[in-house]
Image (spheres, rainbow, N blue to C red):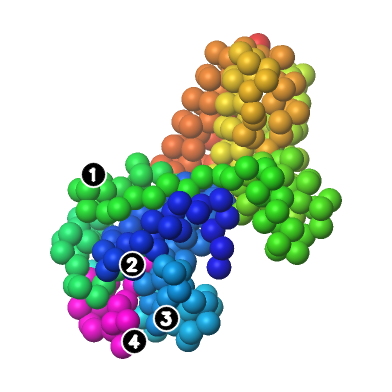
């Protein structure tokens, strides 16, 4: 298991475990595709490996094999629930009970992994707080999230937090080659998702993601032409399912960021999935207009999470964008 471009993180985790100072509560955070889940699995392997080598999991023992294949009996992937995909109070209470059951493995450790933490309410986090603050000696808790804003300050103060970010485009191309993708596939993916290895890999294999990239390009083109009908049709194509809508709005938001930055500095490095479209947009609207559209996209997502009808939200967003872009 390899964490590309995160040698410092690998060294830090290895040093903690080797010196018997492994953090019991850890948060790996960063945007989707930067390797948060890989980091969580790597740290879990390191904690449970029966014969680590130079501060790294051996990758050969039964514990490493079972962890890599999500089969280890002392590794719990805590399940989300509800429309928003958060962690419920009942789930948190179940973890609190289970954490006091001794593990049954060579290292005498057990690990609980909370993936994609978002929309986890205050009551649930407070239920976990005592356990995170004073865990049994053998229990470890790993959280992954896009931002630290998902957590209460009291939770953050009890955790060791590690950021993960995109790597260089050269590193991304090398990583994709190691994964077995062709140079042409890697080049196409990196042109859209730059150094985000996870998103690059998804772009190659996931037709739905490629469609979202095309829609993002169409979104820019419809704003440039001030074509309200085409804009509404494009936004409607985002769909109403929460995860896909969230992904599409995130891409649109990065497009606005690039447009605002490029309008001020044409040599700036883009971060959106459609750099050429962002450059075109930068010539059609001002940085201030791009910032206002960014704000509207954020309000649209807030409305969706508040259970407002997605179709109505997207119609309102279309009206806002056309008003701003005039």
Could you tell me which residue is drawn at 61 percent across and 38 percent down? 251
Circle on res. 106:
4
Instruction: Please give the residue where the numbered disc 3 appears in the rendered image.
Output: 51
- In this rendering, the label closer to the viewer, 2 or 1: 2
Q: CA distance from mark 3 to mark 4?
A: 10 Å
Is 322 above or below relative to 233? above
SS state under label 4 = loop
Q: How many neighbours does mark 3 have within 10 angstroms: few (below 14), some (14-19), or many (20 or more)?
A: some
- In this rendering, the label closer to the viewer, 3 or 1: 3
**Along the viewing direction, whichever of 10 and 136 lies nearer the viewer:** 10
Q: CA distance from mark 4 to mark 1?
A: 35 Å
SS state under label 1 = helix
Please state the extent of the stretch shown in magenta in the rendering. Answer: 94-115
Residue 179 x, y percent position in the rendering: 70, 63
Residue 189 x, y percent position in the rendering: 74, 47
Q: Left or right of 246: which side holds 44? A: left
Instruction: Please give the residue where the numbered disc 1 appears in the rendered image.
Output: 153
User: In the rendered picture of this protein, how many numbered marks are placed on residues?
Assistant: 4
Q: CA distance from mark 2 to mark 3?
A: 12 Å
- In this rendering, the label closer to the viewer, 3 or 4: 3
**Along the viewing direction, whichever of 183 and 33 lies nearer the viewer:** 183
């Amino acid at each position: 298991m390899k964490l590309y471009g995160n040698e410092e993180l690998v060294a830090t985790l290895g040093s903690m475990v080797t010196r018997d100072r492994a953090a019991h509560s850890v948060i790996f955070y960063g945007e989707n595709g930067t390797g948060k889940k890989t980091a969580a699995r790597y740290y879990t392997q390191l904690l449970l490996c029966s014969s680590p080598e130079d501060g790294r999991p051996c990758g050969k023992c039964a514990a490493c094999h079972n962890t890599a294949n999500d089969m280890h009996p002392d590794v719990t992937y805590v399940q989300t629930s509800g429309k928003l995909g958060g962690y419920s109070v009942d789930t948190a209470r179940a973890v609190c009970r289970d954490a006091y059951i001794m593990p049954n493995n060579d290292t005498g450790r057990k690990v609980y992994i909370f993936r994609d933490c978002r929309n986890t309410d205050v009551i649930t986090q407070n239920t976990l707080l005592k356990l995170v603050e004073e865990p049994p000696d053998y229990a470890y808790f790993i959280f992954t999230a896009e931002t630290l804003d998902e957590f209460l300050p009291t939770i953050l103060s009890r955790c060791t937090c590690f950021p993960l970010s995109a790597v260089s485009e050269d590193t991304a191309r090398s990583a994709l080659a190691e994964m077995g993708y062709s140079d042409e596939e890697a080049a196409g993916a990196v042109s859209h998702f730059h150094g985000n290895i996870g998103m690059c890999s998804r772009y190659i294999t996931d037709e739905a993601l490629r469609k979202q990239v095309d829609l993002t390009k169409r979104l820019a083109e419809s704003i440039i032409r001030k074509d309200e009908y085409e804009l509404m049709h494009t936004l409607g194509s985002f769909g109403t399912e929460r995860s896909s809508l969230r992904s599409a709005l995130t891409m649109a938001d990065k497009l606005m960021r690039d447009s605002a930055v490029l309008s001020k500095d044409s040599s700036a490095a883009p971060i959106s999935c459609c750099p050429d479209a962002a450059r075109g947009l930068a010539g059609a609207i001002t940085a201030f207009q791009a910032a206002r559209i960014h704000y509207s996209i954020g309000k649209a997502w807030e409305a969706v999470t508040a259970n407002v009808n997605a179709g109505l939200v997207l119609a309102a967003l279309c009206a806002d964008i056309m008003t701003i872009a005039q």
